[in-house]
Image: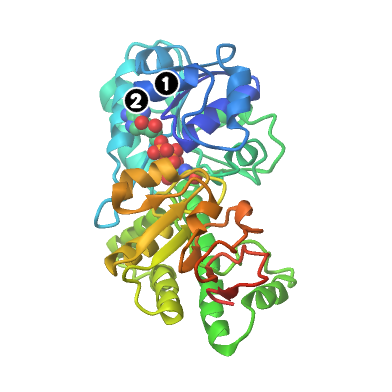
Amino acid sequence: MDISIIGTGYVGLVTGVGLAEKGNRVICMDMIKEKVDIINSGKSPIYEKGLNELLEKNIGKNLVATTDLRNAVLNSDVTFICVGTPSKRDGSLDLSSVKNASKGIGKILSEKDSYHVVVVKSTVLPGTTEETVIPILEENSGKKFISDFGIAANPEFLREGIAVKDFLNPDRIIIGSLDKRSRRIIEQIYSNFKCPILRTDIKTAEMIKYAANSFLATKISFINEIGNMCKKLNINVYEVARGISLDHRVSPYFLNAGLGWGGSCFPKDLKALIYKAKKLGYEPFLLNAVFKVNEEQPQRLLDMAKRKIGSFKGKKIAVLGMAFKGGTDDVRDSPAFPVIEGLLREGANVTAYDPNAEDSAKEFFGDRIEYADSAENSLKDSDLALIVTDWEEFEELDFREMKNRIVIDARNIVKNRKGIDYEGLCW
Ligand code: NAD
């Protein structure tokens, strides 16, 4: 199949590379020329395990990147919209990129004689594809949905850090469509994937994505709340989590108590669903609470740190990890950020280390903090170490160079606890 992908971020690039690997001819389009040039040179502009290897293997053969939308759409039968859908201040979705992409695709479709399917892979609230994307495509192409072009919603569930593996081996594929022709074309694209395919209407497919992320965030906030109580009762919440997850109705995943969830998806998706619920006249009590529990966790870490070392003023504090989770360079809505901000507000000297996210964090903190080139160097002469991201390399850290060997672990990652004053955030 000839496929074009609009947007080469975490989802777009992984989708493009993954579909090329599966034997399709793929054109990845992005408006940022630097990204396109890097991709065409066979390298990934983002860090994702295994992405460089697959990119290098496919680029110039059945994969190419371009800034030219016209070329991408005219030389493909299916176009995936994979642009960002960030939050606005009020929690609603900023759909400007989706609208721009739809407008551009619509204009080019007016020149195209053959049938074309547009697939919305970006996460959008239920109703967006039918109420926003289809009208924009029709208006700009002068064509009619179903008779002249097709539409499908195909939400993505990949996890950053293991995005390539997730894309190529998904738990399920959701195809939301209103017409057989579009559905069959998307089914064909996924015909060599080994997982259940669920066919729904478009709105249901859009809602499945929000329900999935809300449920996962709820699991984490739930175990964090249990963990916060366990801490006061001197109980290890990880044993409690194991105890409940042996019940076949509860899976063991997403029950790791700690600093909470962040990243480019959960916070914005929950905000958007809460916003939508309110617009519908429904007060989403549970989702509000899920958010509230999560927002409190960084402050809990700061309070614990203060109980350990008193005032932060002038103290050297090592922050281990800045990415929102291990395995990625993404710092969007990272729970590490409110922790660092809280330390800075009270006069701490922060030395942070992250194996992958230093460049992204620098754009935010600039020279307000020091950046160490290794975990050990961040620890040197420090009064306190805070483990905020679950990078595997933090498991066996050597804390001997610290001034005071006080370690608070917000991710239950440190294994080498000999000779240190160790405390877990909620265990
Ligand atoms: P991203 O910000 O990493 O990438 C978006 C890309 O789109 C950027 O490279 C940007 O330059 C490009 N772009 C924006 N407007 C464009 C336009 N009009 N034409 C061409 N390119 C354009 O975003 P992402 O993290 O890949 O997320 C994309 C969508 O997928 C979002 O809706 C997100 O919620 C959803 N999603 C993300 C993840 C994830 O883990 N990141 C997982 C599942 C779903």
C-beta proximity under 8 Å, tags 2 and 1: yes
In front of the other: 380 or 127: 380
Query: What residue do we see at 29% from left, 45% from top?
Result: 94
List x then y, in percent, for residue 7: 41, 30
Q: Quadrant of residue 81?
A: top left
Kindly identify the amino acid type of the residue bearing the numbered disc 2. Answer: Ile
List x then y, in percent, for residue 306: 40, 78
Query: What residue do we see at 37% from left, 22% from top?
Result: 34
In front of the other: 280 or 58: 58
Q: Which mark is residue 36?
A: 1
List x then y, in percent, for residue 374: 53, 48
- Helix, strand or loop at disc 1? helix
Q: Is residue 308 above or below residue 68?
A: below
Residue denoted by label 2:
32
Residue 424, can we see it?
Answer: yes
Residue 77, can we see it?
Answer: no
Q: Is mark 1 within 8 Å of ligand 1?
A: no
Q: Is residue 290 above or below residue 49?
A: below
- Helix, strand or loop at disc 2? loop
Query: What residue do we see at 58% from left, 83% from top?
Result: 230
As measured in the structure, the alpha-carbon distance from the residue carrying label 2 to the one carrying label 1 is 7 Å
Q: Is mark 2 within 8 Å of ligand 1?
A: yes
Kindly identify the amino acid type of the residue bearing the numbered disc 1. Answer: Val
